[in-house]
Image: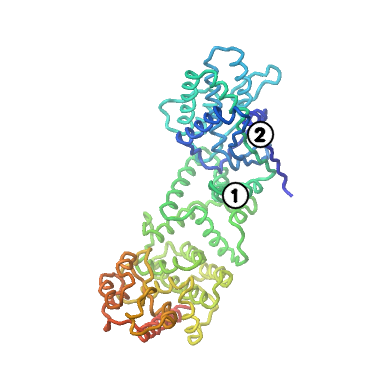
Amino acid sequence: MPELHVSKKSVGKLFSEMQNRKFIIPDYQRPYKWNIEKCETLWNDIEDFSQTDAKIGSDYFLGTIVSYLNEERYHEIIDGQQRITSFMLLLRAFYSKLESMIEDDDVIGLKNQLAPCIWDINPISQRVSNKNKIHIQSLVATEEDNDTFHRILETGNASELAFDNYSLNYLFFKKKCDEYATKLPMQWKELCVTILQKCIILPIECDAQDTALTIFSTLNDRGLPLADSDIFKAQIYRNCETEIERREFTSIWKELTQICKQGQLSIDDVFRYYTHVLRARSNDKSKEVGLRKFYAEEKYKRLKSSNLIPEIMSLANFWRYANTGIEPEDSLYTISQEAFKYLHCLNCYPNEFWKYATTVFFMRNQNSEKFDITFIRILKNLISFLFAKFIEAPTVNAIKDDIYASCISINNQNDLQVRFTLNKDVFETQLSAYSSSKISRALLLLDAYLHSDQTELIANNFDIEHIFPKKWQEANYNGWSVEDAASFLDKFGNKVVIEKKLNIQAGNGYFGSKKKRYAGSKIANLIDLSNYHKNDWLKDDIEIRENEFRERIINFFKENIN
């Protein structure tokens, strides 16, 4: 069972106990992001506390610090690096102010309390012998200002022309110290003591990294837990042997971050999709393991491959293209309008397993001259199988094994090979029963795209229109009862994809009046309804359209399920 050490400590005690040890901000952490606004909030809170609750013996709780002892027996910070960095800058600002003051007993006493918080102290003289021996070290891989941070703590100097957060925040704290000490010299000294003795932190010390990460994820529902890709970034960075390689990797990682942001996906997503490429290449269709565990096998062997970063980058570019239409530079493949239609339908599917097979297809075919033709075929296969399978068995577990096997068949034969038999008579009944399920939106969108006149892509924020409205007045519907309406309201024959703005305009009006609104649509199914030969929309109309819908969907599935 993992060991935990938890004890409430003042800022002064926490930092001063670090003699001959240090806090390490590891390379997989995010860069220092606190700005002056956050530092000002911290300063104002502590200043207010010092003048009020601190005088009656209360403590000011600053939060938790989650760390674990690494192989070098240093405290590697998992949670709290932003706070702990800011406090080191604050303490250094106080010490710098003391260095500029005429020494008396108070100044000497405060320096003797502050110095052990920042540096190692000579055990004999109890003074600072070497200001290089600071109690914190940032190793953040993509942070270009680590040296600036260390230099500030060592020298107490920061450039007025600098724009990094370390310099800006340190100069802010230094300015506040100077102003406060000038206006209220005795209260400034009390403020210093308050910070050291009354500001409380709850350090949680673990014996393993995974334990610390788990605790952080459990405790911290406000911040962002470390992503798996943060760990991967650090591991890859460590594999870089020269400074040039490290700089190149840092630049590429920043580009990858930007591509993923533009593509509306995370770096973790890209690495997850890529696991299925590696699994397919190894003919592995076993149960999927956790993302971090997968890449951690054999001491992160997969992250040491020379193909990793180029393939991750090409994959990120592909998914940005698929999600947003931003075409990569110098790519040999293109995605046609027809392929985008099917991607849109799959994006409405209730889970993301289709992306694994799509990823494997891309990695195999990205340099093929027939990319789009084959891509359309695979997308139609995926839609037909996944949609039909969901109607037969609406659970993730029902498709997992088939998707894993499909990734292998796509990688090896460029074909989606699944075992599925569609019985038309049985399926018609099942399909009608799913008119209000999680997949109904995807089915209605597919039906809209199957119309031969639907040449344009439909907006992602489309609505589903009830032709016979949910809210209605009985007098308008030729004697329909509430019971009749309930049985026909949610049939596929009574639903159609519609633009959001047009749906608001159409409202819950009578069909004869809504037809005029439908005429302004760019969706072919709605335009057909605007030309409908009747101004009433009754049971027979819904049933006819229901049968037509089923026929189109089932024929599409039968044509495209291998």
Label 1: state its secondary structure.
helix
Q: Is residue 248 above or below residue 443?
A: above
The residue most toward the right is 1
Q: Nearer the viewer, mark 2 or mark 1?
A: 2
Residue 18 is drawn in which quadrant? top right
Badge 2 amino acid: Lys
Left or right of 63: which side holds 6?
right
Badge 1 amino acid: Ser
Residue on which disc 2 sits? 9
Label 2: state its secondary structure.
strand
Q: Residues within 10 Å of mark 2 (few under 14, many from 20)?
A: some
Location of residue 43 in the rendering, given as x and y in whole percent from the top left corner: 50, 31
Left or right of 525: which side holds 301?
right
Left or right of 196: which side holds 414?
left
Toward the viewer: 367 or 415?
Answer: 415
Q: Is residue 247 above or below residue 105?
A: below
Residue 107 is drawn in which quadrant? top right
Residue 463 is drawn in which quadrant? bottom left
Label drawn at residue 208: none
Toward the viewer: 109 or 292?
Answer: 109
Residue on which disc 1 sits? 217
Location of residue 42 in the rendering, given as x and y in whole percent from the top left corner: 51, 34
Location of residue 31 in the rendering, given as x and y in whole percent from the top left corner: 51, 40
Residue found at x 62% / y 36%: 201
Residue found at x 57% / y 72%: 398
Query: Mark 2 to mark 1: distance in Å?
Result: 22 Å
Toward the viewer: 455 or 510?
Answer: 510
The image shows a total of numbered marks equal to 2
Location of residue 166 in the rendering, given as x and y in whole percent from the top left corner: 49, 32
Q: Earlier in the sequence, mark 2 or mark 1?
A: 2
